[in-house]
Image: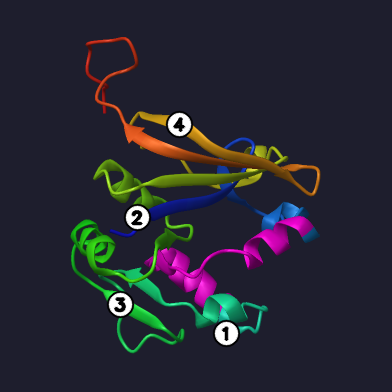
């Protein structure tokens, strides 16, 4: 059985992006980029919005050769084949069931890229084995968008790994457990 990792980069205030801010909030550094290059081979899962964004970067020659070469699976009912990004399969059926089967049969670990609602669905279904967040030390405030954790269920996180990169970026890796009730309570969590 393969593992599924949800992988996010976020601002300290929990956003995935911000208007008028550069990529990685202008704070990507050599240690972080080296870390990205050290990742084990895996299959990348994306939703349609992230696919459109990332495939656009790839088409513009944004230095994404490693990601271009990886196997990618995009879940969408709105995209149409043929897809323009190399090594990408389109899945229009239920993402949860498809990923459940991928974990069972794939020869590679599986990891998400962005795709907030896809990640939320996979976590809620109990399919996520690891949850990794790299926190960039900025507060994007009113310019932030794509709040990562809105509409998530309650989740208990067991710390598995942590480190500081480039003297400022915090990597936190957890094993997640979706909770039915707050810790120490018999009351169910409200949705």
**Residue 141: % across, % down:** 65, 37
Q: Which circle's residue, 4 or 1, is located before the other in the chain?
A: 1
Which residue has dot 2 on it?
A: 118
As helix, strand or loop, the secondary structure at mark 2 comes to helix
Label 1 belongs to which residue? 59
Q: Can residue 29 be seen in this view?
A: no
Give the spatial CA distance, label 2 vs label 4. Answer: 22 Å
- Give SS at disc 4: strand
Eye-nearest disc, 4 or 1: 4
Left or right, 118 with respect to 134, comes to left
Label pair 1/2, CB-CB below 8 angstroms: no
Residue 175 position in % (x across, y down): 42, 39
Query: What residue span does the magenta drawing correspond to?
Result: 31-57
Give percent across and percent down for residue 147.
50, 43
Residue that badge 3 annotates: 90
Q: Label 3's element?
A: strand
Q: How far apart are marks 3 and 2 (CA)?
A: 14 Å
- Which of label 3 and label 1 is nearer to you? 3
Q: Do the residues labelled 2 and 4 touch (CB within 8 Å)?
A: no
Vertical order, 81 against 105 (above or below): below
In the picture of the structure, the residue carrying the numbered disc 4 is: 158
Q: Distance between the residues labelled 3 and 4?
A: 33 Å
Q: Distance between the residues labelled 3 and 1?
A: 18 Å
Seen from the viewer's position, the closer of residues 110 and 154 is: 110
Q: In which quarter of the image is the N terminus?
A: bottom left
Q: Which of marks 2 and 4 is nearer the N terminus?
A: 2
């Amino acid at each position: 059985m393969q593992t599924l990792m949800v992988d996010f980069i976020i601002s300290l205030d929990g956003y995935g992006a911000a208007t008028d801010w550069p990529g990685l909030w202008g704070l990507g550094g050599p240690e972080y980029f080296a870390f990205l290059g050290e990742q084990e081979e895996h299959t990348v899962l994306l939703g349609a919005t992230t696919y459109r964004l990332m495939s656009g970067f790839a088409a513009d020659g944004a230095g994404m050769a490693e990601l271009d070469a990886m196997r990618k699976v995009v879940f969408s009912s709105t995209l149409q084949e043929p897809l323009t990004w190399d090594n990408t399969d389109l899945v229009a059926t239920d993402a949860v069931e498809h990923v459940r089967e991928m974990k069972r049969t794939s020869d590679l670990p599986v990891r998400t890229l962005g795709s907030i609602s896809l990640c939320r669905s996979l976590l809620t279904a109990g399919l996520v084995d690891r949850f990794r967040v790299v926190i960039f030390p900025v507060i994007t405030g009113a310019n932030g968008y794509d709040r990562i954790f809105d509409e998530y269920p309650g989740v208990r996180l067991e710390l598995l790994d942590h480190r500081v990169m480039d003297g400022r970026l915090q990597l936190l890796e957890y094993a997640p457990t979706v909770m039915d009730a707050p810790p120490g309570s018999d009351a169910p969590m409200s949705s």
